[in-house]
Image (cartoon, rainbow, N blue to C red):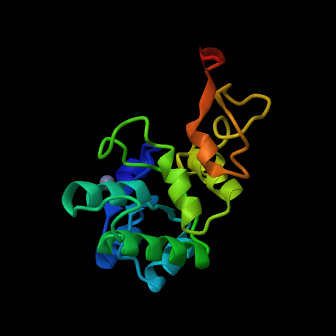
Amino acid sequence: MNTAHDLGRKVAAHAMSDEGMRRAVVAGVDTIEHGLGGSEATFRMMASKGVAYVPTLTQVEYYGIYFDHYVPGKTPPTAEMIDSERAFRLARSVGVTIASGSDVGVYPHGENGRELIEMVRYGMPAPDALIAATATDAAVLGEGERLGRIRPGFLADLAAVTGDPTVDIAAVRKVVFVMKDGQVAVTP
Ligand SMILES: [Zn+2]
């Protein structure tokens, strides 16, 4: 941990159980991924130490599809999905910084936008979900001075969607324009 931080690197811990999360936080990690089992005490410690939570809600849903016969919209949520919703709501209620990461690769690339939709479904206002996936993610990665906002001097990484994602978060999946480092990558 100290060596990583001495080198200016961030440390992420993919932890599921409360004890695993607690040990990682005490050890000094910067983020906790998954965190399904997090207790109120652990989330409060994360809030006080500035450790961000990356809830990976979509990953949990896909594990249900792959391993527990979960069918979205047809079968009830799996035990892990119930745990992840509980953890997400609890973390928000005690003021943990929420970042948005997907663990994509567990499920197909290109489906990442689903994570924001899940965050809103579990009670986060759409503008907050957008901030989690942009400005907060940039800050959590130590890149808050050049990524995650539209500002003079920041990298020209932009995406445009059809619709207003601050009203209907599902619009994040309707990408019609992408600019990366000032170069147009996708255009209508
Ligand atoms: Zn993971």
Q: Quadrant of residue 85?
A: bottom left
Q: Residue at the location (41% across, 55% down)?
A: 58
Front in this rendered view, residue 180 or 78: 78
Q: Quadrant of residue 71?
A: bottom left
How many labels were placed on the picture?
0
Q: Image height check: is 9 above or below 125?
A: above
Q: Residue at the location (67% across, 62% down)?
A: 125
Residue 32 visible in rendering:
yes
Farthest residue toward the front? 74
Q: Image height check: is 91 above or below 173?
A: below
- Residue 126 locus on image (x, y percent): 67, 56
Relative horizontal placement of residue 16, taking residue 10 as reference (left or right) = left
- Residue 68 locus on image (x, y percent): 22, 64
Q: Quadrant of residue 149?
A: top right
Farthest residue toward the right? 152
Q: Image height check: is 27 above or below 38?
A: above
